[in-house]
Image (spheres, rainbow, N blue to C red):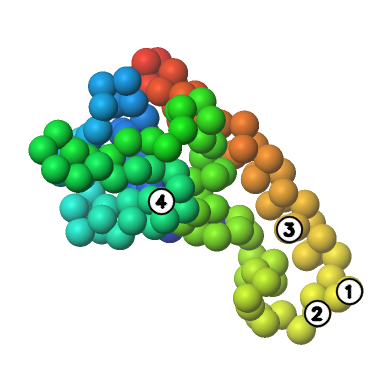
Amino acid sequence: MLKLSTKGQYGVRAMFEIAKSYSDGPITIKEIAQKQGVSVAYLEQILNKLRKDGLVKSLKGPGGGYVLSKKPNDISVSRILKALEGPITITQCLNPKSNACSRVEGCVARLLWKSLGEKIERFLETISLHDLMKEESKL
């Protein structure tokens, strides 16, 4: 089973909340946490990583909070997940930092998993925060 970590899941949800307030200005971390049911402490870690990767900006002082660094249409789910999770790999043998498999060179299954991972990544690149906002209106 392909499983995304909570960091990736919560990161997409946090970015979604920030995108929804794009035209209204900054949204506080407390508001994001409240709307998405995520702890403020964990969100701080996630948003700090997203800020360092250039996806959000943090504005200090009264009226401060988080804003997107680009338009919601210009930020893909793939980009968010790469910032938080690293490269999308569906098995350990595809992880460049792992030495989990000694059969890497001649493994047909590895080619299958690599192809599947590339298809998933291409799909996630086609979904923007703006697309998620449109989908919310259907709920």
Judged from the image, the secondary structure of the residue bearing numbered disc 1 is helix
Q: Is residue 50 above or below residue 94?
A: above
Residue at image position (38%, 43%) is: 56
Query: Residue 16 got which mark?
Result: none
* Residue 33 visible within the image: no
Q: Mark 4 and mark 2 in contact (Cβ < 8 Å)? A: no
Quote the CA–CA distance across marks 3 and 1: 13 Å
**Residue under numbered circle 3:** 113
User: Mark 1: few, some, or many residues within 10 Å (few <14, many ≥20)?
Assistant: few
Report the disc number at residue 106: 1
* Residue underneath mark 2: 103
Outermost residue, top side: 138
- CA distance separating discs 3 and 2: 14 Å
The mark lying in front, picked from 3 and 4, is 4
Counting residues from the start of the chain, the first of labels 3 and 4 encountered is: 4
Name the front one of labels 2 and 4. Answer: 4
Q: Amino acid at mark 1?
A: Gly
Sequence-first tag of 3 and 1: 1
What x and y, as percent, mark residue 124? 59, 39
Q: What is the three-letter code of the residue carrying label 2?
A: Arg
Q: Residue at x 19, y 53 (%)?
A: 39
The quarter of the picture where the N terminus appears is: bottom right
